[in-house]
Image (cartoon, rainbow, N blue to C red):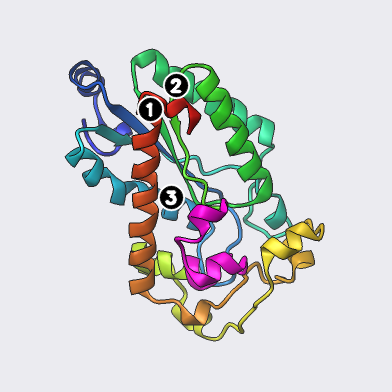
Amino acid sequence: MKAAFAENAWPAVRDALKTSRNAVAILPCGATEAHGPHLPLNTDVIISETMAAHALPLLERRGYAATILPALAYMPAEYAQAFPGTVTVSAAAAKALMLDIAMSLKAQGFACLALANSHFDPANVAMLRETAEDIRKRGLPVAFPDFTRRKLAQTLTEEFQSGACHAGQYETSLIMAARPDLVDETGRLHLKDNPASLTDAFAKGARTFAQAGGPDAYFGYPRNACTAEGKESFRVMASALIDAIDIATSPDGQRN
């Protein structure tokens, strides 16, 4: 089975499901939303797809038949919706689509659905948590490394942990590592530091990036971004995804 699920002809999927009890479908979850004046609208999609791609060869070495589904590029993106280019959908619509995808995969015989998510809008994270639990209740194990949980957040960069990390050093480094051609280098080097924490702003009731202190849709320190940091972050994220898959496919994995 090819790495990109949609590039397979159907017999290849059939054969992979027949020969492996550990067929895993990875679903990259992103968004189409503003990421500062220097990063593309599909930043989260790129990050999630690249995380999955880094995990794939390591999963294959562990005996999984893993493949990467076409990414979900439209998710709840309420905080960025004031910016042109942002396309947000309701949590209910996103959840319904994900449930249908999951049940289709279950019917085919996939052993696990893995969610590779890098879009941390509060509405999206809440939806993913709820959806993952509902899918598990319907009988399909789900691997969902939630990087907003403290334990996993602490494995990522200092900026990420600070909450000032939308289109800042953390995400800009990831895109520099994955798609440097999409980074406006001149633009990012002229951006002022923005230490405003989205996490703190969310807790205080902010409902938009502007209210949170990001009038240009970025938070953090994009001038400090570098390719090496992005590569290391991808390594950490891919490792977390693999660990979540191991747990989800273990005998007591439904508790993951």
Q: Which residues are magenta?
A: 149-171
**Answer yes or no: do the residues labelled 1 and 3 have beta carbons within 8 Å?**
no
Point out residue 11 in the picture as x, y percentages from the top left corner. Answer: 21, 18
Point out residue 197 in the picture as x, y percentages from the top left corner. Answer: 67, 69
Question: Circle 3 sits in a helix, a strand or a loop, which is it?
Answer: helix
Question: Circle 1 sits in a helix, a strand or a loop, which is it?
Answer: strand
- Determine which residue is flagged by label 3: 48
Residue, far top: 107
Could you classify mark 1 by the number of other residues whose Cα lies within 10 Å: few (under 14), some (14-19), or many (20 or more)? Answer: many
Q: Which mark is residue 112?
A: 1
Q: Is residue 228 magenta?
A: no
Q: Earlier in the sequence, mark 1 or mark 3?
A: 3
Q: CA distance from mark 1 to mark 2?
A: 6 Å
Q: Which mark is residue 140?
A: 2
Could you classify mark 2 by the number of other residues whose Cα lies within 10 Å: few (under 14), some (14-19), or many (20 or more)? Answer: many
**Answer yes or no: do the residues labelled 1 and 2 have beta carbons within 8 Å?**
yes
Q: Does any portion of residue 252 appear in the rendered image? A: yes
Amino acid type at mark 2:
Leu
Q: Give the number of callouts.
A: 3
Point out residue 87 in the picture as x, y percentages from the top left corner. Answer: 63, 48
Q: Earlier in the sequence, mark 1 or mark 2?
A: 1
**Which quadrant, please, contains the N terminus?**
top left
